[in-house]
Image (cartoon, rainbow, N blue to C red):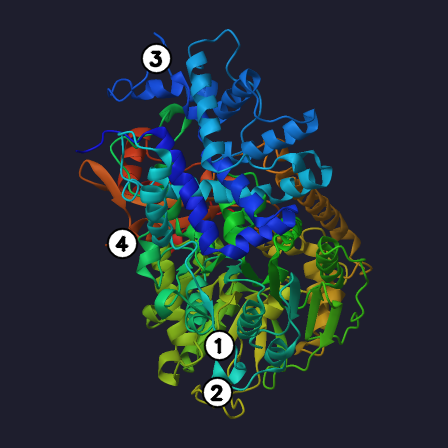
Amino acid sequence: MTAHCHLLPYHLLDVAAVGEQVLRARPELEVDLAEFLGITSAEFRSLFLFGLLLHDLGKMTASFQSLFEAMGLVQIHLPEGVSYSGKTGRHDQLGYDVWKQAQRAAPIFHGTATAKRCFQFYLGIFWGHHGKPVRQEKTVPAHDKLRLTEHDVGCAQAWINDCQIFLGEQPSLHYFSDQSFAERLRQVSWLLAGLGTYCDWVGSDSDIFEYCDQWMPLPDYWREIALPRALKAIAKTEVFEPVTIQPFHGFNSLFSFSPSPLQSYAEQVPVTQTPQLFILEDLTGAGKTEAALVLTHRLLQSGAGRGLYLGLPTMATSNAMFERVAAHYHRMLTGRDGDKPSIVLAHGARELNDRFREAALGTSAADRPYDAKEDEQTASLHCSQWLADSRKKALLAPVGVGTVDQVLLAILPKRHQSLRVLGLYGKVLILDEVHAADDYMLTLLEKLMTLHASQGGSLIMLTATLPLARRQKLVQVWQRVLGQKETPLERTGLDDFPLATAVSYEAGLREERLPCRPGTEKQVAVDFVHSEADCLDRLVRAVEAGQCAVWVRNSVDEAISAYRQLRDQLARPDQCLLFHSRFVLQHRKEREAWVMAHFGKTSTQTERAGKVLIATQVFQESLDVDADVMISDLCLIDDLIQRAGRLHRHTRDASGKPNPSGPDDREPPRLMVHAPKWSSEPDRDWLKDHSPNTQYVYQRPGRIWRTMTYLHETGELRLPEESRRMIEYVYGEDVVIPEALQQAEREYDGKARGSSNQGHFNALDLEKGYTPDSNRAWTEDDVDIGTRLGEESKEVVLVRRARDSYEPYIEASSRAVELSTVKLAGKKRSSGLVTLNEEAREAFIQCYPRAKFSLLVDAETTPYTEVEGWGNPRGDAGNV
């Protein structure tokens, strides 16, 4: 006979059974947590299951049970007039009220007031299973006998007693009076909260945990139903899928080419299973990604992790990085029965394991929000929407490729941040292009480093040349977490590049200067071009000469303008492409594929001849591409070095044919820089008069003047010999900036300090533990942090009208929402959006749960086109 509901005790047992099976699947998790807390594994298991068994204590109230009265499902007497409102008392918050009244009537916990508060904090970790910590304060007044009755309290007491009997003994609670235990508990509470949320989600899967409304002894249900189903349920999500670390047999067993000095370092540097930090500084094209994968493999083999996540500065070039990781990861890890473990690309368009892609919880007709006005949803609805979002799911997969934003959200007060903490546990974290981070992101990164190291994680940072002060700060953060004395850097010379920096518990700080990879040394002559017309003329001449050329612009709107003008001057406009970040994913993927086909390492002379690309900064990020001719807008020196790294990156013969084993026979590389005329005494608007957008994007005319001055004096970029000298020439603390530009630099420095302070303000106070006091501004998970001075960005899903409803802008059998998504940075650009009305939005989300966290906009109301992407009709400065 079909059950009409699932009795609450069975759901609580289901969730606890998931927790039991998680600990069985990942015994090292139980050991780590128990050892960290200073208790035995058996004590931890008992305590953990007890928390799960009480996570929905707030559902044992008349007010919550009244939700099901209209369905005829309530099997207890309810007071007349009782109702449920998430605004006055959500069921997760009500857990506190139930516990306090049950304790008052018949306390099970006897100890000091401090110990009681600590134990109550512990239970609050599990009451906050809907993504935010609950405030431990009364929501049901003493005179309110409707929402929480004496009968409710009696039922709760009976359940608590049953749980103690069920567990075989009362969880040992004496350690809650220990102050050091309380501190450790607060530190680990973030991970416990993620585990609790995961267990609740998986234990709510009605496809596996079928409804049961008939009474049976709890031990029988646990043994015969809950545990077997829980094993099946966690296998379905694959978050805790078993992985086997493959033996590391050396670099040459993984790659078909000889290792570079950096890659040899990664192959040989001592590694342990304790938290380790590596900062790898080298030129573009030196093979930093492969070095990081080798180092990750060795860290995994040493016991330092069981998976990896690679965080990129943006998703604009993620497909290429995904391909590089996907080609290698199965040599590092194998899954169940020797299969490849799941790997997920965070924008959702590429996943190499269908099982993980299809993981979603079963829902039933009863799975509607408890309180739609307060957005209080069931666990299965939360999970389906969250797992449908591949940006988030990539963190939970054994192997993920996504943005650094997704990991930084683990230390921000966003709903379900604890799931990101869970996703980071046991991962080796690789962060690419660290030099591109601004003050705001660096502040958050320091918090992330503290969290990750405290969980036993290791971190690999890939970067071009870092300013010395920044490298020192990153090293000191790691040293503090390890409890080590902060020591100054030793390798601080201008010739200390390429460089590998390592910090570990066993060896402390180690720095090693490395030779550069043969063939990556570069001497690039620099010419200045002062007008857009001359830039366009040079591109036309390159096309006529059969070369492939690129103009890297500093803003989207300038790129669109140049693209329009260039197409009008080309005999074959189809040879020209526009590439920036403000395309929907489908069109961005198509452009990335075009760029790789015509500018990639294996591109032939025929494929390259006459091709021209107008791009923004996305061209310099994580793409293994090579241009014959390059123009760059004047920018900061580190960006310019990155761009120049894509000029003659691969060796070719005079015609452009790949020549991997020989010299480059093309004319020596010359970088043309579109810039204002140099002046030893520039006026205040020296840069703004030339390019308002460059001024807007960088806001640092003084440092850009220093960049141009260096190029004016030397006439070249010489890599790697002058790499650090160039960085310090521009960013050094004692450099001289013309008086007319100093005010703008002071304003930028003020904004940077404010941005750093904002990072501290926005970030969670991890030491306070999983509690609302960790940050007063907990928000929904629908905003991404930006990468420039704390600017937030909005994710927009473009839709089109389809008869009486809407559908994604891109038609696709799967992942249509992801493929129709574009990210817009800044309030100016997103403030005027015309979003779908609430009725149309809800109807769309019913069909496409992934869209829950995005703005839905009818494409016809936007300036978006397939050819140019999201332009700016107002003409003000655009993001990259």
Q: Residues within 10 Å of mark 1 (few under 14, many from 20)?
A: many
Q: Nearer the viewer, residue 592 or 187?
A: 187
Q: Position of residue 513 (x, y in %)?
A: 72, 77
Q: Which residue is mark 3?
A: 78
**Where on the picture, by quarter, is residue 836?**
top left
Task: Nearest to the eye among marks 1 and 3: give it.
Answer: 3
**Where on the picture, by quarter, is residue 399?**
bottom left
Q: Is residue 158 visible?
A: yes
Counting residues from the N terminus, which is met first, the one under dot 4 or under dot 3? Answer: 3
Mark linked to residue 652: 2
Counting residues from the N terminus, which is met first, the one under dot 2 or under dot 3? Answer: 3
Q: Which residue is mark 4?
A: 814
What is the spatial separation of the Cα atoms under label 4 and label 3, in whole angstroms? 46 Å
What is the spatial separation of the Cα atoms under label 4 and label 1, in whole angstroms? 33 Å
**Amino acid at circle 3:** Leu
Measured along the vertical axis of the image, is residue 391 above or below residue 842? below
Q: Is residue 412 left or right of residue 227?
A: right
Q: Position of residue 149 (x, y in %)?
A: 44, 12
Q: Which residue is mark 1?
A: 626
Tell me the SS state at disc 1: loop
Q: Are marks 2 and 1 in contact (CB under 8 Å)?
A: yes
Q: Nearer the viewer, residue 633 or 346?
A: 346
What is the spatial separation of the Cα atoms under label 4 and label 2, in whole angstroms? 40 Å
Name the residue rendered at 58%, 75% in the picture: 671
Tell me the SS state at disc 2: loop
**Amino acid at circle 2:** Arg
Tell me the SS state at disc 4: loop
How many numbered callouts? 4
Q: Residues within 10 Å of mark 2 (few under 14, many from 20)?
A: many
Q: Position of residue 364 (x, y in %)?
A: 26, 35
